[in-house]
């Protein structure tokens, strides 16, 4: 039972393949060649799965994708080592892209993007740990955490795809911004999954994980901000003190639904999804724009209007929110 067996178990069957699909579609958007960029797409799925393996150990979650998590199947030590190896596979994918004809300067640039993104993802995971048990953290702290933990890797998927596909700086930045906004929307959607009776059944992982680990997600933070003193006490008890996870989850769900926190979180997710779609209008029309827009449906939020159908997207106020790397300079 070697390393390859752990790889196979972790990677197959796959999840949504959101990150490799973003990389491939971004490359094709700028006229790239599928054969040449495919190893990078495999690599980004490897690093994502490796991060899930480590997350499951940190969160003490015993299931993933509806079956035993890797550490539950093979042991904690094996899962940690295999996850580390999957991280390196991300860069091995770039080496294979070089052998398939991607210019070396493009490979070097993509490698820098991947390295920076990897550090940001780790910062996001660390930030999430520091929020444990802290219901008074502002929503802005949560958004910065989500931008790093999830937005950075989706941004990297789009940037690396556009770089390897031969895109110019402007197009690389636009596709990166699309991935960034989509990533934050996706993280908010992930926080909402346990509180939706339809999506909760297909999560494939424990719905009470955040409560069990005393981590306040966006809807919980919003509920605490909106609550009166009695409800705040109930939220604190459900998150921090209740020894019965099912009872705590039931209490939390009722509070989030009653004071409108779930609806508010869905609205914020929809804002980010719309911002992602709005970025696509700035790209030249092409066969990949529609599929990229449709990918915002994976967040389970908002309505998707076919991109470039009339060169418009629904208007919306621009909230004060974190901005992607390309816009920070």
Image (tube, grey):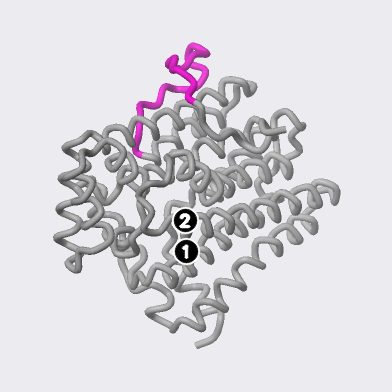
Residue 285 placement: quadrant? top right
Task: Please say whether residue 114 is visible from this viewpoint.
Answer: yes
In the rendered image, which residue does mark 2 sit on?
Answer: 128
Q: Secondary structure at mark 1?
A: helix
**Measured along the vertical axis of the image, is residue 321 above or below residue 254?**
above
Task: Name the residue: 44% across, 70% down.
Answer: 58
In the rendered image, which residue does mark 1 sit on?
Answer: 52
Dominant secondary structure, magenta: loop
Residue with the most extreme top position: 310
Give whichever of 159, 120 is nearer the camera: 120
Task: Name the residue: 60% across, 25% down.
Answer: 286
Task: Please say whether residue 30 is visible from this viewpoint.
Answer: no
Give whichever of 239, 328 is nearer the camera: 239
Per the rendered image, the range of residues in magenta is 300-319
Whether label 1 touches label 2, CB < 8 Å: no
Give whichever of 221, 295 is nearer the camera: 221
Residue 145 x %, y %: 51, 48
Question: Magenta span has 312?
Answer: yes
Q: Which of the two marks, 1 or 2, is nearer to us in this view?
A: 2
Residue with the most extreme front position: 229
Instruction: State how far apart marks 1 and 2 are (Cα).
Output: 14 Å
């Amino acid at each position: 039972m070697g390393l390859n067996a752990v790889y196979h178990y972790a990677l197959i069957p796959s999840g949504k393949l959101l990150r490799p699909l973003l990389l491939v579609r971004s490359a094709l958007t700028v006229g790239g060649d599928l054969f040449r960029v495919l190893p990078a797409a495999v690599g980004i799925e490897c690093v994502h799965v490796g991060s899930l393996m480590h997350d499951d150990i940190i969160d003490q979650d015993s299931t993933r994708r509806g079956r035993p998590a890797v550490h539950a199947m093979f042991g904690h030590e094996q899962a940690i080592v295999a996850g580390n190896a999957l991280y390196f596979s991300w860069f091995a994918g770039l080496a294979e892209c070089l052998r398939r004809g991607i210019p070396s300067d493009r490979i070097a640039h993509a490698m820098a993007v991947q390295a920076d993104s990897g550090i940001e993802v780790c910062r996001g995971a660390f930030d999430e740990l520091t929020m444990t048990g802290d219901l008074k953290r502002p929503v802005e702290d949560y958004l910065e955490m989500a931008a790093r933990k999830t937005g950075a890797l989706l941004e990297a998927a789009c940037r690396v795809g556009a770089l390897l596909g031969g895109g110019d700086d402007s197009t690389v930045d636009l596709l990166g911004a699309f991935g960034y906004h989509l990533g934050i929307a996706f993280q908010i959607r992930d926080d909402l999954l346990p509180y939706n009776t339809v999506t909760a059944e297909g999560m494939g992982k424990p719905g009470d994980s955040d409560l069990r680990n005393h981590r306040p997600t966006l809807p919980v933070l919003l509920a605490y901000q909106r609550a009166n003193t009695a409800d705040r006490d109930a939220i604190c008890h459900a998150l921090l003190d209740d020894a019965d996870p099912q009872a705590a989850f039931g209490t939390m769900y009722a509070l989030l639904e009653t004071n409108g926190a779930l609806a508010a979180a869905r609205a914020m997710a929809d804002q980010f999804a719309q911002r992602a779609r709005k970025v696509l209008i700035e790209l030249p029309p092409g066969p990949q724009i529609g599929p990229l827009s449709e990918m915002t449906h994976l967040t389970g939020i908002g309505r998707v209007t076919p991109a470039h159908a009339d060169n418009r997207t629904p208007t919306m106020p621009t909230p004060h929110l974190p901005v992607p790397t390309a816009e920070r300079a």
